[in-house]
Amino acid sequence: MSEAIKKITKDGFWTNNPALVQLLGLCPLLAVTSTFINGLGLGIATTLTLVGSNVIVSMIRNLVRSEIRIPVYVLIIASLVTIIELILNAYFHPLYKTLGIFIPLIVTNCSIIGRAESFASKHSVRHSFVDGLSMGLGFTAVLILLGGLREIIGMGTLFAQADLMFGEAAKGLSITFIDDYPGFLLAVLPPGAFIGLGMIIAAKNVIDRRATQRAKTLVSMTPATEISQAQ
Amino acid sequence: MQFNKTTSINMHNSNNVSAVMLRVLLALLPGTLIYAYFFGWNILLNITIACITAVISEALMLYLRKRPIKPYMKDYSAILTACLLALALPTLAPWWLIVIATLFAIIIAKHLYGGLGYNPFNPAMVGYVVVMISFPQYMTQWLIPHNGLDLMQTLQLQLWGITPESIILDSITSATPIDSIKTGLSLQRPITEIGQSPLFGTLGGIGWEWITTGFFAGGLWLIYKRTIGWQIPVAMLSTIAAMSLVFNFISPELYAGPLLHLFNGGTVLAAFFIATDPVSASTTPKGRIIYAIGIGLLTYIIRTWGGYPDGIAFAVLLMNMAVPTIDYYTQPRIFGANR
């Protein structure tokens, strides 16, 4: 794996995560993450769109005039979302019904057009594919983390309604943590999404700050000779 | 000869934060004692639980935020928030409900916004609303006055959720007067008939009328001491009185009169102690009147036509949100500046 691809992957998952750093696509992020499975469903749909749009935009990047690029991107994304919506409707109908309006709304998810504009239109197909995949999976990771947290706190379960996605066999996946849990409704309601996302972002910032501090102390603790040798 | 070193000799009332908070706590005392007289040990237990949680979470947050713990703890603001919250929550609220409400009030509504002086929302009301929308089934469990529970039975009921033998829970709990008006109206009974139920005394609910009087007296003392301004309580109470008077005049069958509105559901407590929170309330004299009228209107609207039993908490939070705008448009003219 070359350096560039490593950097792109790390960008998508951590340094420039669409949900935690760019704060793009918050509308679906906050609205559908009431359970783990909902988050996973929307995450996969978004990832597929992101990979597809990044690859196509990157392929035609030298053919489209810059004056009309935005409408062209929107057309590409809209077609991809329509395909995904039809697939979901055909094969995962219950999940399609729970996610509802948020599947067609992937078209307006700013992180997708943002990647098309700021990355895919300037990089090769291979790099754009990796970028789309890592950004999409980074977004999905936050979706399922937030969805899982809200589900555990709000309803005391995890992987409830897994059958929506994996068929009847997955019904046993659902875990109930506390029997007759009174339910913490706030976590399931929209304020819970905002508070939860805020906490996750805060946690990420703390981890980042600790990491920089550790790096600093490491440098200051290394004897000067070693540093000059390394240089 | 020795001179006392003083600054600003024209400032004679020592209105530092802890003095203000202590005075407000003292003013809450008569109402709280009357509450305990009518409803028993529960309220004192609730206040204790809330205070312990508040002190621990306050210390924890100060430690995490690397602030000096002792001077900040001495301002008593966390204790005051806890007391107001405990007085607002139902008497029979389970202990974990009070703990969750207090944790939200202190950690999220107060410290995550920057601590005392920076919180845009009233912490006690945030805590109340959190448990109100999360656990509506526990928010209707009020004791009846003179329920005859002794201390041990109270502890059993509250901490372990065990109903003591020889006591039937249904016979010592009831809806609040405001709630029973709401359910009565939904059953198409006229207000005059609902008011005949044994829950109601001469002015408001039995017990509640005296508790309200206690808070009223404490509030008047605070105004006399210039700890709070007169604008907010006067404007809020008169708005609610005026609204209920008008609607009661239009249809006495459907709308409760002003006495029921003023002497029930913590209206007075909110007007003197909650809406006047110096941090989250409007700061200009004219702004305070607008702010309080807004709370009064919203409280009446939510109580009368809304889905929740009492609208004060929502009304206070909604008007807290409007405070920056109100303050911006009601700044007093600087002396000498152009009109």
Image: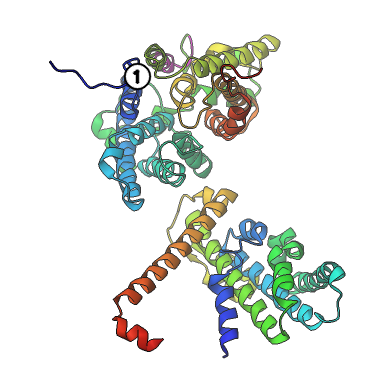
- Most foreground residue, B12 or A71: B12
- Residue B126: x and y, percent? 48, 38
Chain on which label 1 sits: B
The amino acid type, in three-letter code, at marker 1 is: Ala
Between B28 and B328, the residue placed more toward the observer is B328
Q: Position of residue A60 (x, y in %)?
A: 82, 81
Q: Quadrant of residue B209?
A: top left
Using the rendered view, name the quadrant where residue B191 is placed. top right
Q: In the figure, B230 relative to A17: above or below?
A: above
Give above or below for B61 relative to B307. below
Q: Residue at x 70, y 71 (%)?
A: A118
Residue furthest out toward the front: B1
Q: Is residue B206 magenta?
A: yes
* Quadrant position of the C terminus of chain A in the picture: bottom left
Q: Residue at x 31, y 20 (%)?
A: B33
Residue found at x 59% / y 76% = A169
**Segment tinted magenta in the rendering:** B203-213
Q: How many marks?
A: 1
On the picture, is B10 further left or further right than B119?
left
Instruction: Provide the secondary structure element on which disc 1 rests.
Output: helix
**Who's the residue at 47% across and 37% down the image?**
B128
Residue identifier under label 1: B27
Q: Position of residue B96 (x, y in %)?
A: 37, 44
In this rendered view, identify the residue nearer to me: A184 or B53. Answer: B53
**B193 in relation to B126, above or below:** above
Question: How would you rate the neighbour count of disc 1 (Cα within 10 Å): few for under 14, some for 14-19, many for 20 or more?
Answer: many
Q: Is residue B162 visible?
A: no
In the rendered structure, the answer to whether residue B183 lies left or right of residue A115 reads left
Residue B35 percent coordinates (x, y): 35, 21
- Does residue A17 belong to the magenta stretch? no
